[in-house]
Image (tube, rainbow, N blue to C red):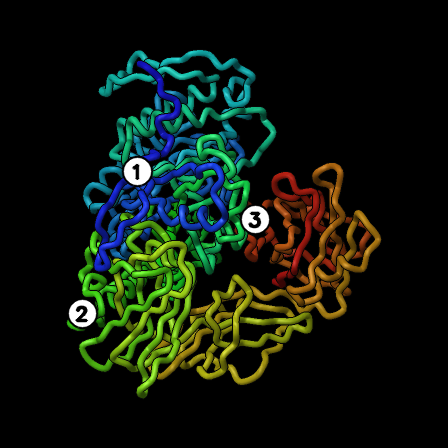
Amino acid sequence: MKNYLLTWRPFLVVVFLIFLTSCQTKEEPLYIQTVEIPEGFAHDQKVELSGQVLPHPRQMKWFEDEFFGFIHYGPNTYTGREWGTGFEDATLFVPGDLDTDQWCASMKEAGIRRVVMVVKHHEGYCLWQTRYTDYSVASSPWRDGQGDVLRELSESCQKYGLRLGIYLSPADLYQIESPDGVYGNGSDFTTRVIPRPVHDRPFADKRSFTYEADDYNEYFLNQLFELLTEYGPVYELWFDGAHPKPGTGQTYNYDAWFDMIRQLAPDAVIFGKGPDARWCGNEGGATREAEYNVLPLPQAPEAYDWPDMMGEDVAGRDKIDEETRYFHYYPAETNTSIRHGWFWRNDDEQQVRSADDVFDIYERSVGGNSVLHLNIPPNKEGQFSQRDTEVLHEVGRRIRAVYGVDLLAGGTASDLRVMDSNSDTRWQAPAKAAELVVQLPQVTTVNRVMLQEAIAHRGERVEVHHVEAFINGEWVKVAEGKTIGYKRILRFPSVTTDQLKLVISQSRLAPAISRFSVHYYDEPPKPVVVRYNAKGEVTLGVGTSFVWKDHGTADRSQSIYYTLDGSDPDAHASRYDASIVLPLGGHLKARAIVGDRMGPVSALRIGIAKEGWTATDGSVESTEASRAVDGDINLVWMSEEQPVKGGQSLTIDMTRLYNVSGMAYLPATQGGYIESFEVEVSSDGEVWTPIHKGSFGNIRNDPSRRIVHFDRVHEARYLKLSNLKAPGDLRRVGAAEIDVLAE
């Protein structure tokens, strides 16, 4: 079969539209997904041109699905690791009572429309009946080796009306570590036919492809062919750029991968190092104030080496410069986990996000010109745990209650097309700055406005806007934002009004708005924010931030109740009136209560009071190491940069003996991360006992507080973290704070 290596390349399609909207003005041509900038274009011309780039139809379908589920499941579920090693026994994976119907029913209840499943993570274990390795469910005792997780999920997706996507890790530790593994084995790139025939398992799909590939690319393409022809339809391919063991010398033939995907699954969005969607830049659910879909590039997208875009500004006007030669439609996906970690570890200690937190992320991501990709990891039984499903059901209820009711319905607007729920109709602004007024059917209390640009037909154009409410005879600004794009949800304190006005003050071209809707959210009490210092003093306040982010603005206007025995507090628990002193720390849970309404439970493992503690950096004489145990997360310890990765250490002197059972680690997000470590304890600082080896998977992308439990309680005055290694190519480790947990 003839090979078109670059058939994935986005179209340079020109769509000529003669008449537009209410003002019937003639516009410049519009370009689907990519446009090359003509020579000699000035900066202002480039800015305007970026507003003429449209999403591909597959990207529009991706946007319209809005809320995705993510499934991380595999050997890591049974080992308690975030990243496997490739040495895990294939028989370790044994779902007790796999129920993919339960997954899909719970996700649909949450409002999720698309689900991406990890069918092979970095350790290389395959959750489908692949022909090309035995390191898969075929070697598990589960269902006598005949089980197929992906097959069951595919059938459940069809049953519940969800679109299926597939995560296939390019990294593969099993193929790296096995003596006969094909990853980075130095084989030549030669002409190869995909799929490679397997004698006793012929394919029903008789298509074949010819590519230049080495052994691993052939292996990867063979598996892609299986997935795309035997488990479809597939609507997303997710290629993670992370690699637990870089430097293995393997080159990926992305052109071949993308060519096969475009031919076998033309509706599939390619995420990651592909051409269609990108990572938002973090895994904690954070969103940018201005998220752009159209990115400026110095070269054609198929030749561009896509970096991880983690900065706050990826496509603002300042990013469009004389080096910009192309614009490419490349929207962001906000991916985060409902649990503290991508894989399930346990139901007792592993933190689960509250419905308040997930709903907040939903409004900021889906309402911030992105999509939300929420991971829900199945437990060892192959099911979503109860705490997770309760959150999903409550989030879905809130989405329907708030955004299923448009308070503008029955009202009017200066252009009625923004009210008709039809993305193909729109109000075309007459200029780059413009205003649009809507009239509610009656005076109503509101605190949400939802806006959408007509990106499928007019592109992304708005850069600065705000909303005003007519209150007591005058217009009052109530909310402001930057980009709109696919969707912008503006949240503001409740106001009572019957008129609202959208004011667009800066755009790249005259914008087009396809939707304006008005909503009200009856907000429950907010989450409790927990603070503690080196003296063991704990303070509680009500804020908007989830507790493991460890930041937020306290608000004492709501009553707070707390427990120290691990139970969930109610109105009969201890009421918080003044700081709590916990010299030995403890397991604190707290929530705000207003009348009969209870807020979410915030839980935090608090360490032993650290007043007077010191710490020593094993690689340098410095007093800064004690910042790791000073009770102040804003003062951080950073080790010296090491020429050889690993070998750093940190010794903590707790000044007296304690019975220690674990530790908590918060990284220094300025660049001080610990990925792997060993723990030793001593009573005298001379004789040391090794007690634990561990790792913090994905700590660089998810720099959240991590808890470590030792196998048993140890009496110690000194605790040493040794053989500290940083993630990736970093040569420094560090910490914002390290806590030691008592028995």
Local secondary structure at mark 1: strand
Nearer to the camera, 374 or 393: 374
Report the disc number at residue 699.
3
Report the disc number at residue 658.
none
Residue at screen point 65% across, 59% down = 736
Image position of 498 (left or right of 489): left
Nearer to the camera, 539 or 545: 545
Nearer to the camera, 543 or 455: 455
Give the labeled residue for mark 2: 409
Q: Quadrant of residue 625?
A: bottom right
| Label 2, label 3: how far apart the Cα atoms are | 46 Å
Mark found first going from the N terminus, 2 or 3: 2
Mark found first going from the N terminus, 1 or 2: 1
**Vertical placement of residue 190 versus 474, above or below:** above
Q: Residue 609: percent from the left, percent from the top? A: 67, 69
Q: Amino acid at mark 3?
A: Ile
Residue at screen point 43% across, 77% down = 592
Q: Amino acid at mark 1?
A: Val
Confirm or deny contact between disc 2 and disc 3 (CB under 8 A): no
Quarter that holds the C terminus: bottom right
| Label 1, label 2: how far apart the Cα atoms are | 36 Å
Quarter that holds the N terminus: top left
Q: Nearer the viewer, mark 2 or mark 3?
A: 2
Q: Residue 726: percent from the left, percent from the top? A: 65, 44
Q: Residue 334: percent from the left, percent from the top? A: 42, 51
**Residue at the extreme bottom:** 472
Give the labeled residue for mark 1: 14
Residue at screen point 56% across, 36% down = 244
Can residue 364 be seen? yes
Nearer to the camera, 707 or 656: 707
